[in-house]
Image (cartoon, rainbow, N blue to C red):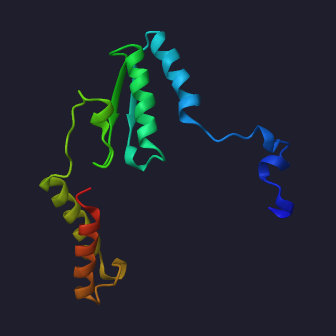
Amino acid sequence: MSGGHSTYTIAGGDSADLQIFNFTRNWEPLFHSILKSKIKLRILIDALDECDDPRELLIVLRHAYEVIPGGLELLVSSRHEVHVDDKFPNAVTIDVRSDSSESDMDTYITTEIYNRDNDDRILEGNYPDLEGKLVRILNNRAGGM
């Protein structure tokens, strides 16, 4: 922005009242209030590993879970780098990196590369060797996801 002014400041906001969003400070009290009211809370988190701080989120959820045991149900998807079972040792885990998901990814990638009309194909069907390389690279990078 010109003159170093943000849209927020131009709209009348004061930069002194801007705060970095803090999950613990902002959401933990809300979770506790909901759970103390005896409302069952169900939360779905897809791609927890893509959160800025998945460990912090798990800690907040664990604290919320402890407010009313059984009052919070979670369904979480994540890659293996995030250890959900560290905070939720009784969690049921399902490994989706099985042969079937790898086969599904291979089928999808192969279909997208080879089974389109030539004029819709990435390389228009003119470079089958490169298409084969592309399929191998995409399958390796997908890792069965």
The residue lying toward the viewer, choosing from 23 and 104, is 23
Kindly identify the residue that appears in the image at 28 percent across and 70 percent down: 138
Q: Quadrant of residue 76?
A: top left
The count of marks equals: 0
- The answer to whether residue 55 is left or right of residue 98 is right
Image coords of residue 25 (percent x, y): 58, 29
Identified at 42% across, 42% down, the residue is 54
Q: Spot the residue most to the bottom.
A: 126
* 18 shown above or below 135: above
14 left or right, relative to 57 = right
Residue 40 visible, this angle: no
* Residue at left offset 24%, top offset 61%: 143
Residue at horizontal 78 percent and vertical 47 percent from the top: 8
Front position in the image: 41 or 49: 49
Instruction: List the single residue furthest toward the left.
Output: 99
Residue lying at the far front of the rendered structure: 86
Question: Is residue 19 in sight in this rendering?
Answer: yes
Residue 11: where, in percent of width, then height?
Answer: 83, 45
Quarter of the image with the C terminus is bottom left
Up-down relation of residue 73 to residue 102 (above or below): above
Quadrant that contains the N terminus: bottom right
Q: Position of residue 28 (x, y in %)?
A: 52, 25
**Could you tell me residue 7's position as x and y percent?**
78, 52
Q: Is residue 17 above or below residue 40?
A: below
- Quadrant housing residue 60: top left
Say left or right for 113 vs 55: left
